Image (cartoon, coloured by chain):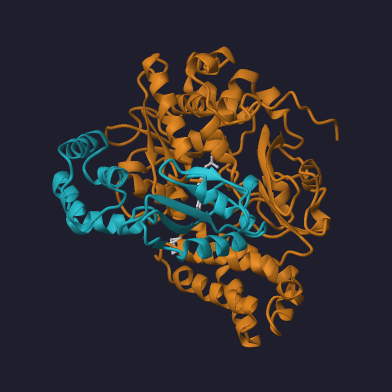
Amino acid sequence: MSLSPDLLARIRDASAHHGGPRAAMLEALRMIQQEHGWVSDAHLAEAAQTLGVGLAEIESLATFYSLIFRQPVGETVILLCDGVSCWLNGAEEVRDALMARLGIGFGQTTADGKYTLINIACVGGCDRAPAAVVGRDRRLVGPLSPEGVAELLEGGL
Amino acid sequence: MTDFKPNTLPLTGRARADRRPHSLAEWQALGGYSAVEAALKLSPAEVVAQVAAARLNGRGGAGFPAAQKWRFMPEPGQSPGTGPSYLIVNGDEMEPGAFKDRLLLEALPHQVLEGAIIAAHATHATEAIVLIRDAYRPGIAAMEQAIQEARAAGLLGALSIRVHPSAGRYIVGEETALIEALEGNRAMPRKRPPFPAASGLWGRPTTVNNVETISLVPHVISMGPEAFSGLSWTDEGGTKLYGVSGRVKRPQLIEAPMGTTARELIERCGGVSGNGRLLTFQPGGGATGFLGPEHLDLPLDFGHVARAGSMFGTGTLIVLDETACPIGAVARHMRFYARESCGWCTPCREGLPWASRILDALEAGTASAADLDALRMIAAEAGPRGRAFCDLMGGAMAPLASALARFGDRFEAHLTGGCPQRRLA
Ligand SMILES: Cc1cc2nc3c(=O)[nH]c(=O)nc-3n(C[C@H](O)[C@H](O)[C@H](O)COP(=O)(O)O)c2cc1C
Ligand code: SF4
């Protein structure tokens, strides 16, 4: 599936506004991900062509950033904080409970395509530790507990 | 010390408990944008003089005086070439244990914007960019909304301002790496000098300031520099948005006079949790050296903490009680810094994963005495400033070196059977 005409137009607009096409590469990647959930090889190539930048150039940027996904992710991405403040409050027990419940490890997606679990640097939720940010709006959830994991998943992230 | 002055919380006093940002009209009803109006009547040099008199130090980690940084910015026509000058507001906050800029961006976006308008005026910047990490999408949305409202109301004048959402990577927060990121490159730090004020974004004069620094600027103008600097207990002006997390009963952000002690901050969090007894604390996020119970009455500001042998960093404390393992904490910090190394310099690219592997082995009980020697060697060789291209490596070494010095016996104890705390649990 190729990028929609609307998205292509927005990518072109972005390159006009932000000091040249190179500076618009990250924004283009973000826009693609917003619409498709991740950035496929085909979409990457289309973005490169639309911006008039090299494929290798945009690919090197896409692989630099940990939150540009280069493989499909689930409907809801759970970014679980692995910072020390969360660890001090039981984050690893929450991690184990989440993994057991979902049947996946970090960087994996559930078979039904619902959830992807990723560990992430301190999410700035130290006052709600252990914390995670979930979904497209990166909603902060916490304090989490191993017992509360089921509720969290059922409550619709 | 005199009593705490609860009515003087310029930075957070107007934040809502649920962190919902104010509309422009609501913000103006709370006095918003009067500081901008006043500042724009002053010359840039007058604004800089007020910020200098207020003794406002940067809150991004190094505590560099804001006015001094701003004075490096050339007046229009004085820099070679033509084109814009830039003000960049650094909202990449990814330091372990730091959660202060999240509040300022999410709940008080108009305050950030006011500060940016005034700072841009003072630094002759024609464009401002607020860079915000991806995990702070609520903050990104709040800032974008605030900018849109202010623009529609004509409050931005000729200033062009936009949000640049980042996409995860700690090194983006380093100011020269941030400039690379904005240009569309992989965010690898640049050589300094030239400093950004001489040659920054696209080679143009650029100032980078932290979100908290910028958020304080309107208050220098509206309160006046003397009242502002008088908010502090020490010779570093203003209030500080402290944070306390880890093993305390009610982890939280606390705006308090600069120079407030860890004792008072921890008390306001209901005290130490776990076994209730303080083992150690990091005064300013992951990249700062451990202090101990003997530092509970140290005024926490950049100068005092540096003289005590650590760094004030982000001013967000990470607290460990006696049942928490400092080696486990350093191990997790090191995994993070190793993962986030940009890979440019060998000691950082190779040394951090090496240290990280040894720390993990110590925790698991598989490390040897030779490993521990290697760990000490890494800390000694890579710790001092100037051994790497940027401060990420030195920051990563600060908790390790201070833990080795402070808790040497605990490291030794891990050689036989791994983490004693784990075995207890
Ligand atoms: C690895 C690394 C990461 C950094 N991350 C941030 C950050 O997220 N936010 C920030 O304001 N400063 C960060 N800094 C410090 C910036 O380089 C810069 O000093 C700061 O933004 C200046 O702001 P100030 O003068 O207002 O303190 C980082 C520095 C290093 C070495
Ligand atoms: S110290 Fe580390 S993060 Fe900094 S430039 Fe060198 S390799 Fe990159």
Left/right placement of residue B207 relative to residue B400 reads left
Location of residue B230 by image quarter: top right
The percent position of residue A6, horizontal first and vertical second, equals: 18, 35
Q: Residue at x 56, y 66 (%)?
A: B334
Q: Quadrant of the N terminus of chain B?
A: top right
Q: Colour of chain B?
A: orange
Residue located at (50% from left, 28% from top): B109
Nearer the observer, B131 or A152? A152
Q: Which one is nearer the viewer's eye here, B200 or B341? A: B341
Look at the image and tell me whether residue B237 can be seen: no
Ligand 2 positioned in quadrant: bottom left
Quadrant of the image containing the C terminus of chain B? bottom right
Q: Is residue B148 above or below residue A53?
A: above
Image position, residue B420 (x, y; %): 74, 76
Figure label count? 0
Q: Residue at x 58, y 43 (%)?
A: B64
Chain A, chosen colour in render: cyan
Please give left or right for residue B355 compared with residue B294 in the image. Answer: left
Q: Is residue A139 visible?
A: yes
Which residue does the image show at 37% across and 43% down from the upper left? Answer: B200
**In the displayed structure image, the side of residue B420 where residue B369 appears, left or right:** left
Question: Toward the viewer: B176 or B250?
Answer: B250
Estimate the x, y position of residue A20 in percent, counting from the top left. Answer: 22, 40
Dividing the picture into quarters, in which one does residue A83 lie? Answer: bottom right
Residue A106 against residue A38 in the figure, above or below = below
Q: Position of residue B129 (x, y in %)?
A: 39, 35
Left or right relative to A149: residue B389: left
Q: Depth check: A71 or A85 in front?
A: A71
